[in-house]
Image (tube, grey):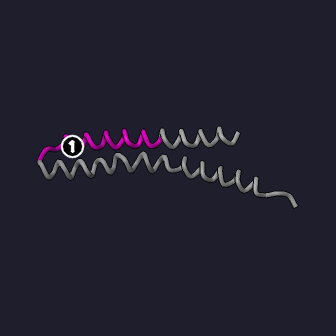
Amino acid sequence: MGDTSGKKGVVFSQVKQIGALTAIPAVLLVGPILGYFVGNWIDRKFQLYPWFTVFFVFAGFFAAGREIFRLLKQVLKEDEAKK
């Protein structure tokens, strides 16, 4: 019988990377959508439409971009550590 713990570690690492990479579309959607709802709520409360909606949508895109960059950096760092 061979040692399968090495194979399990590789499979676990690959599944972890796939999980991190499949989170990217969700992050791209959630940031701006959440920004829209928060900005829209503030605009309706203070009658300032569309200023806060626009600001928070852009802030949502910026936050999503930062999170995607962080995810990709983490995946690449783990990939380099395997080698």
Residue 76: image location, x then y, percent = 59, 39
Magenta stretch prevailing secondary structure:
helix
Q: Is residue 21 left or right of residue 29?
A: right
Between residue 39 and residue 79, name the one nearer to us: 79
Q: Is residue 49 magenta?
A: yes
Q: Is residue 5 left or right of residue 62?
A: right
At mark 1, the secondary structure is: helix
The C terminus lies in quadrant: top right
Between residue 72 and residue 35, name the one nearer to us: 72
The part of the image, by quadrant, that contains residue 75 is: top right
Task: Quickly name the residue at label 1.
Answer: 52
Q: Identify the residue at image location x=55%, y=42%.
A: 74
Q: Identify the residue at image location x=48%, y=38%.
A: 69
Instruction: Residue at the far bottom: name it.
Output: 1
Residue 61: image location, x then y, percent = 36, 41
Q: Identify the residue at image location x=79%, y=58%.
A: 4
Instruction: Residue at the far right: name it.
Output: 1
What stretch of residues is rendered in magenta? 47-68
Residue 37: image location, x then y, percent = 27, 52
Q: Is residue 64 magenta?
A: yes
The part of the image, by quadrant, that contains residue 66 is: top left
The N terminus lies in quadrant: bottom right
**Quick check: 6 above or below 77?**
below
Q: Identify the residue at image location x=28%, y=48%.
A: 36
Residue 70: image location, x then y, percent = 48, 41
Q: Is residue 2 left or right of residue 64?
A: right
Instruction: Residue at the far left: name it.
Output: 47
